Image (tube, helix red, strand yellow):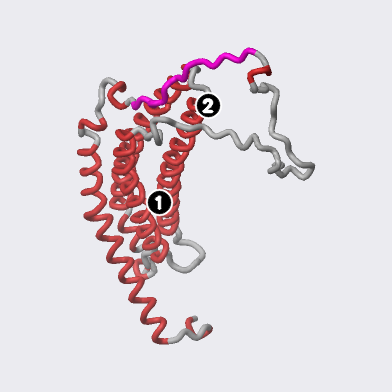
């Protein structure tokens, strides 16, 4: 069948070398890296940083003072409350208007993130990336072990396909954890902007606290899920390693 398609001998050799490297790396991941990593993450879950009893310890106050109220009497003091920025018909701001753009000045300087959560996130993110990368390698290995399509005797192939599907699911879930972290920063930034704009509204400040607590709990769940995924993948592949590596057994000789 290979004679139907001419492949450069040098390229074929290099491809075979690549396949061997993938196979060697993937087998090492399943046999050694996965169990070590799950034990490492299990130990991480026992650290004090992930076992805070009182969530007030991870709170971070938004240091923006409530300004003194400004009283407006009437338009004779030079302030016109109904003044609005004029715009041209095409939507471009009229630069001839001297009112300028409203800009909020923060006397305290830049409003900081929740440093405790940032430190925790910086520890969790590399673990997420590692899981994605290692799953991709193992998935490639299993896919390369899938034999050519034939009628019958495909039970082992179905196990390979189930394994690939599980690895792909783990990859997708791990990627969603990174999206979750990004959404946390965006949501918190919007709430901080609201506090700067409406400093007298206490609900915005309380919402910041709620968001931080929710993210802390989510990060602990993420670490737990990462550990569990290593356990599941390690167990699943080991239980089915024979069918994964040799999906088809020739039984023809046994019939005679």
- For mark 1, what is the residue? 167
Q: Which SS does the magenta portion mostly show? A: loop
From the top left corner, tell me how far across and down residue 252 is, in percent: 39, 69
Query: Distance between the Cα atoms at labels 2 and 1?
Result: 46 Å
Taking the magenta stretch, the answer to whether it contains residue 2 is no
Foreground pick, 161 / 191: 191
Q: Residue at x 31, y 66 (%)?
A: 23
Residue 4 vertical placement versus 19 (above, below) = below
Foreground pick, 30 / 154: 30
Q: Residue at x 44, y 31 (%)?
A: 106
Q: Residue at x 35, y 32 (%)?
A: 114
Magenta region: 60-73
Foreground pick, 46 / 158: 46
Taking the magenta stretch, the answer to whether it contains residue 63 is yes
| Picture quadrant where residue 46 is located | top left
Q: Is 251 left, or right, of 77 in this rendering?
A: left
Contact, mark 2 vs mark 1 (Cβ under 8 Å): no
Q: Secondary structure at mark 2?
A: helix
- For mark 2, what is the residue? 197
Residue 130 vertical placement versus 220 (above, below) = below
From the top left corner, tell me how far across and down residue 61 is, in percent: 36, 25
């Amino acid at each position: 069948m290979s004679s139907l398609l001419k492949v450069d001998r040098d390229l074929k050799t290099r491809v075979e070398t690549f396949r061997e490297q993938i196979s060697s790396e993937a087998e090492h991941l399943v046999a050694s890296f996965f169990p070590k990593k799950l034990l490492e993450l299990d130990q991480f879950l026992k650290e004090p940083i992930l076992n805070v009893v009182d969530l007030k310890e991870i709170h971070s106050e938004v240091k923006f003072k409530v300004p003194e109220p400004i009283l407006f009497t009437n338009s004779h003091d030079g302030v016109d409350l109904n003044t609005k920025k004029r715009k041209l018909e095409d939507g471009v701001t009229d630069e001839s208007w001297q009112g300028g753009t409203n800009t909020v000045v923060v006397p305290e300087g830049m409003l900081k993130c929740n440093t405790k959560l940032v430190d925790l996130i910086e520890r969790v993110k590399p673990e997420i990336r590692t899981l994605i990368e290692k799953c991709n390698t193992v998935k490639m290995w299993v896919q390369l072990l899938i034999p050519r399509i034939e009628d019958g005797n495909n039970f082992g192939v179905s196990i390979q396909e189930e394994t690939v599907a599980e690895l792909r699911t783990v990859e997708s879930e791990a990627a969603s954890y990174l999206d979750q972290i990004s959404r946390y920063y965006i949501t918190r930034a919007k709430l901080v902007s609201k506090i700067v704009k409406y400093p007298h509204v206490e609900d915005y400040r309380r919402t910041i606290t709620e968001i931080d607590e929710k993210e802390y709990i989510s990060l602990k769940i993420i670490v737990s899920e990462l550990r569990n995924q290593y356990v599941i993948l390690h167990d699943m592949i080991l239980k089915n390693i024979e069918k994964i590596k040799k999906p088809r057994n020739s039984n023809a000789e046994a019939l005679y």
